Amino acid sequence: MKKFYNRIAETALLPFLSVIMAFVISGLLIVFSDAAVLKVIGSPGKFIKVASSTFMNAYIALFQGAFFDPHLTQGHTLLQGFYPLSETIVTATPLILAGLSVSLAFQSGLFNIGAQGQFIFGAIGASYVGFHYTFSPVVHVTLALLAGIVLASLWGGFVGLLKARTGAHEVIVTIMMNYIAGFFILWILKTKSFLRPRRIDPLAPNIKPSAELPHLLGSTMRLHAGILIALLAAVFVWWLLNKTTIGFQFRAVGANASAAKTAGISVGVTTMLTMTIAGALAGLGGAVHVLGNQYALTSDIAGSFGFDAITVALLGRAKPRGTVMAALLFGALRTGGRTMEANTSTPLDIVLVIQALIVLFIASPALVRFIFRIKNLQSQGTLASKGWNG
């Protein structure tokens, strides 16, 4: 029973408390940056009333913008009130796949900082097949997704090859390759193969309707089949890591590469395979983003998905289930933040503050344990035992 409690506390309690602390501190920033609150700061009674109202209104607006807005049901069905939730899921879908990419690499002891570049190449492959060819819907979507997966897996696998053959550190290599991918997409969007006809700005043609991922809740909501793909990918990563020999090798190399080598595991092959699959997952995220949401390749198609994926993987403790939940949280912050800004004039930048504080507390579990008087847990098989908790 004690071991079960330790496992729950290590994998769920600390991240949960980190999120709560981030929201509380960010709420204080919202309160003390509000002009109405500062006006009554000399009157304790009025200050508490106005401050609490400001705090609650900001987070109520955040909730309405991320999950359910009762105002949207007026003149419509109850389902329409969940439009914000559909937007949260749409935003989280590519983030889940990119986060799984980083999480898988973490499990093998690798830092895949290159999810951004892999995401870009996945989007490029899916976009080209999406607008250049014509097939039946199911075949077209499948081929477009495969194109993104193949391109990104090659891009990620090259990093694994360099590390295995030359010992080049994957962090440095992936950071440099992110730059290459970023400038590559700027160049390719100016070529005749990708530039939209009669346009001079870097914008590819729209993918054909047969390549679009189908909507799950009708045309009034943007929720598409990409979330099903992302959840299946999470199940696949869990199965791969926990039920297969290859997954055991990944985890063995991540735990102790020298011991794994002594046991007969090829560290080089494992490294290449890990980065290839990680690249494929991030590329699938880029492909899903194009086929289900954007419909056209742009120079900023990746946004910050590849970099946010690192935070998502950390918050999810490099576990598939945790990564999915963390991505949904970040999706909610993104979508809800816009409503919070519109309804309460709270700057959208506060969302970035919340994300930054979450990362800070996740990276400093000893601080969270001290604040909440939680005993230091040394459970085996977690990131704590691998040095992730400092």
Image (spheres, rainbow, N blue to C red):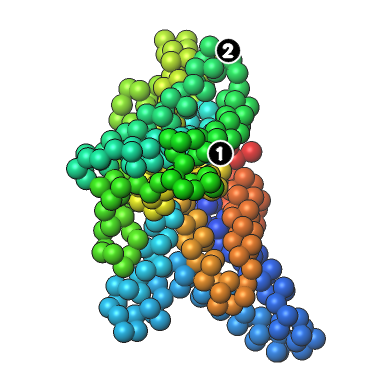
Identify which residue is drawn at 62% across, 79% down: 54
**Residue identifier under label 2:** 166
Counting from the top left corner in percent of width and height, residue 299 is at: 53, 44
Q: Nearer the viewer, residue 193 or 155?
A: 193
Task: Estimate the x, y position of residue 286 in percent, counting from the top left.
Answer: 43, 42
Kindly identify the residue that appears in the image at 59 percent across and 45 percent down: 376
* Residue that sits furthest to the right in the current view: 42
Q: Residue at x 46, y 36 (%)?
A: 192
- Note whether 270 is above or below 184 in the view shown: above
**How many other residues sit within 10 Å of disc 1, few (<14), some (14-19) or many (≥20)?**
some
**Amino acid at the residue labelled 1:** Leu
Image quarter where the C terminus lies is top right
Q: Which amino acid does the dot numbered 2 rest on?
A: Thr
Q: Let me know if residue 340 appears in the view.
A: yes
Q: Which residue is mark 1?
A: 186
Determine the secondary structure under disc 2: helix
Q: Give the class, few, some or many, for how many residues have Cα within 10 Å of label 2's Cα (few <14, many ≥20).
A: few
Give the quadrant of residue 166.
top right
Element class at badge 1: helix
Residue drawn at (46%, 48%) of the image:
198
Judge by depth and name the residue closer to the eye, 57 or 160.
160
Coordinates of residue 213 in the picture (x, y in percent): 29, 50
Tell me where residue 121 appears, x and y as whole percent: 46, 34
The mark closer to the camera, 1 or 2, is 1
Residue extending farthest to the front is 198
Task: Give residue 352's quadrant in the image.
Answer: bottom right
Q: Earlier in the sequence, mark 1 or mark 2?
A: 2
Up-down: is 366 above or below 73?
A: above
Can you say whether 370 is above or below 51 in the image? above
Tell me: residue 341, above or below residue 262: below
